[in-house]
Image (cartoon, rainbow, N blue to C red):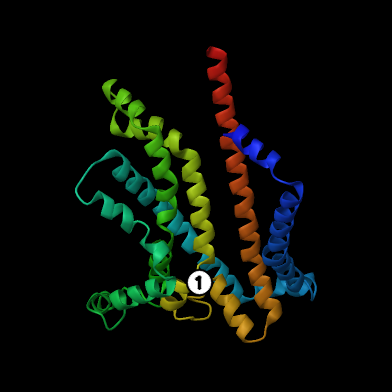
Amino acid sequence: MSSHKSSISNQEPIWIRYILISVVLVFLTLMLIVPLISIFAEAFRSGWALYITALTEPDALAAIKLTLLTAAIVVPLNAVIGIAMAWLITRYDFRGKQLFTTLLDLPFAVSPVVAGLMFVLLFGANSVMGGWLEAHGMQVIFAVPGIVLATLFVTFPFVAREIIPLMQSQGDQEEQAALILGASAWQLFWRITLPNIKWALLYGLILTNARAMGEFGAVSIVSGHIRGLTNTVPLQVEILYNEYNFVGAFAAASLLAFLALLTLILQHLLNYLQERKNRLSLHRVEEIE
């Protein structure tokens, strides 16, 4: 495959290669690099002191704490749900399996705003379920539980979608061998399944965390925009920008931009470690042969 690609590239005129590279670089510069730099430049334009002040005022701290709390709840839940879904799809055959696999991508197809409205209809004060919960002292909409549910809905495919292809390619030979040797279900999971999927799981969790902290549409519908209570960092950015508090808005936005950069770095690191592991495994196989 690599020799085929190299032969194609050698047959192409060199000016085509340079044009394609230039177009890609210009696009990335205008659409990604320049906006990212402008966010940090605007955030620090008034000085470091005002930047820190904008991030430490009570409403901003409440938004940061709520964002971290939501991610801390959603990410572990996604790990459990994602592994369970991947195990069900790759290890069992059942009627409706294809439909179940298709529904797994529903959060990707449905607008986050529509997802938020669905939870309002289900758990709002005027709904049967929401009215019953509020009568028993449990509020979902315009409270933390609603934010967690909406965020969980838009993020739950990430882990499963990273694990499923890997588990399908690996097969279940090792797990079957462990069962024959007398391993329990718990030993099977911790010693065979989890080590085999750990890189894909970490990759999915990183994507889940980034989306959970940056989610706006669904959370905006179910939160109610209550200052200091139900505003996450993305909602805080919108409120501050609409109030012409550009220092505060861009300071909060810089946190989300930093999260995006950190996500890219972690993704690159995981890809590097996975490729290194694959190279070492291939090298060992070649030595044995």
Question: Which residue position is annotated with label 1?
Answer: 216
Q: Quadrant of residue 149?
A: bottom left
The secondary structure type at the circle numbered 1 is loop
Q: Residue furthest left?
A: 95
Instruction: Give the total number of marks visible in the rendering.
Output: 1
The percent position of residue 33, horizontal first and vertical second, equals 71, 62
- Work out whether residue 68 can be spotted: no
Q: Residue furthest top?
A: 289
Q: Residue at x 47, y 39 (%)?
A: 198
Nearer to me, 171 or 13? 13
Q: Residue at x 53, y 63 (%)?
A: 213
Give amino acid for label 1.
Phe
Q: Taking 260 as reference, is 57 above or below it?
A: below
Q: Taking 87 as reference, is 59 above or below it?
A: below
Q: Quadrant of residue 189?
A: top left
Q: Residue at x 49, y 76 (%)?
A: 229
Q: Residue furthest bottom?
A: 243
Nearer to me, 98 or 162? 98
